[in-house]
Image (cartoon, helix red, strand yellow):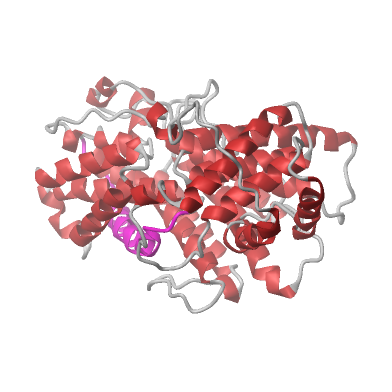
Amino acid sequence: MDDLESLIQAVTNAPLVVSPTAFCSTSPSSREHSGVNAQEHRETYLVNAEAVLRWPVFESISIQPSPYQSSAAQDDYHSPGLSIPVDLDLQSGGHFIERFFEDVHIFNPVLEEQDVIEYLGEVQRNGIGWDAKSCLMLLIYALGSISTPFMNQNPVMRSCDFRQSHNFSRAESFFLNAQKRLGMLLTGNGVIEAQCFFLAGVYLMTTLRPMEAWRMFVQGLACCQALQSHDIDHAPLEAEWSPHERIYWTCFKSELELRLELNLPRQNGVDLSYPTMFPSPPRGLETKNEPAWYFYLAEIAMRRLKNRALGTLYRIDNAGQAIDREEAAMDFEEQMHAWYRSLPEALAFNLAGDVGWADAYEPFRFILKGHYLDCQEIIYWHAIVGELGLSSRNSNETFLAKGLQLCVNRIKHNKQGFYHRHHGTWLMIRSCTRSALVLIAASKCDDLDQQLPYGWEPAISDVTAMLSFWKEESPDVFKALQYLQLLQATN
């Protein structure tokens, strides 16, 4: 796969690192200049909700969006002076682990089940210590306490009620005690330290604390990079299984997804480079677990495709000119279809229809289809911005129509998981909100009435309902709901 990818890059001349100008924010005044210059290019192709709210079509509405910022009150679930006991209930540890492996680990297989069972035995014999293994077990207990099966479901309780539930209180107790041990792992460079930081990030994402989760993923990635530099001089045999690769890839893609969405400043621009290898499978991979492993590899392959698209479609050459995006977009469309055709039968989702819940592999198909739709957004975003985000209208009508249809398709697809709490909930909220804002922007343009796809208004209402459900858990979700309601009222 690496060799084939290198051939594609040679043909498309697609760099692995995006230009520093591609995703840096600029002042609103840059939109007033005619033509395409570097300043305007940076602003108009920012792919997030805040950039959409700054489009000219919304200028008459009093909205001043700001990048995501963590709220101090967001994490104030417990009084600082309150002693939080840990109800370890060591004999129930197996129950937490079972739920963790069934509902969390299956989507990011960075652990070995046999290793975790051994750690559990040590904890049951000796109690919770202050080492990395004890920290890892506490994080597994925390995630096992709040995890639920990934399936189409209506909310069983309001989001704010979840914060008052026994499951959440128990999970927070486990997590806060794991957090006390994380500081002791900062100087470690082992795999288990990276696993601890990654699982801490997963827990924070599951409880809608993305900025805090990003810090954990960064630290996990730092551990992985230290491991990689060590492995240069102590490289394992090619056929030897190595947990280094899996935790590296998982930390990498999790950190990158959040970095792009949080608009975090970087001195050298947005680095979209990635490890060159695909991770090796876990020990003793059984037939029943093969679809889960293929899912993991398919996610990585799609992440690489997204990175190439971002690095190519929004690149400026040395002369300050943008590439031919229409030609490049058609090329990436074919690469995207090739990725879909390469999926094994167990993971092949229905491109045209809804995802059903027929078997145990449907959650994999659901997530992969979501990635497919996200890739479509990257490919068609230049056409959407060309029509709605610039004062001059110069978009490709075919790509614009595909982009608007994508917005409806994404909302319709993700509706099945609107009320499910998991690692990707916050990212799903953000992407669906962005799609709703694009549809509203298009509806405010009189000459685009015929381009709006069927079902666009119900799709916006669905997003509003979804934001209302999660609004009390995260300040940025509440802010997004306010923006959406204001725009609907003025439409």
Can residue 87 be seen in this snapshot? yes
The foreground one among 5 and 351 is 351
* Tally of numbered discs: 0
Can residue 273 be seen in this snapshot? no
Screen quadrant of the N terminus = bottom right
Q: Residue at x 25, y 46 (%)?
A: 437
Q: Quadrant of residue 430?
A: top left
Q: Residue at x 55, y 54 (%)?
A: 145
The foreground one among 174 and 415 is 174
In the image: residue 221, left or right of residue 370: right
Q: Is residue 413 magenta?
A: yes
Q: Position of residue 426 (x, y in %)?
A: 42, 46
Q: Is residue 366 magenta?
A: no
Please provide the residue range marked out in magenta: 392-421
In the image: residue 77, left or right of residue 8: left
Q: Is residue 34 above or below residue 329?
A: above
Q: Residue furthest bottom?
A: 358
Q: Residue at x 46, y 25 (%)?
A: 319
The foreground one among 472 and 234 is 472
In the image: residue 360, left or right of residue 134: left
Q: Main secondary structure of the magenta part?
A: helix
Q: Residue at x 77, y 59 (%)?
A: 282
Q: Is residue 468 above or below residue 223?
A: below
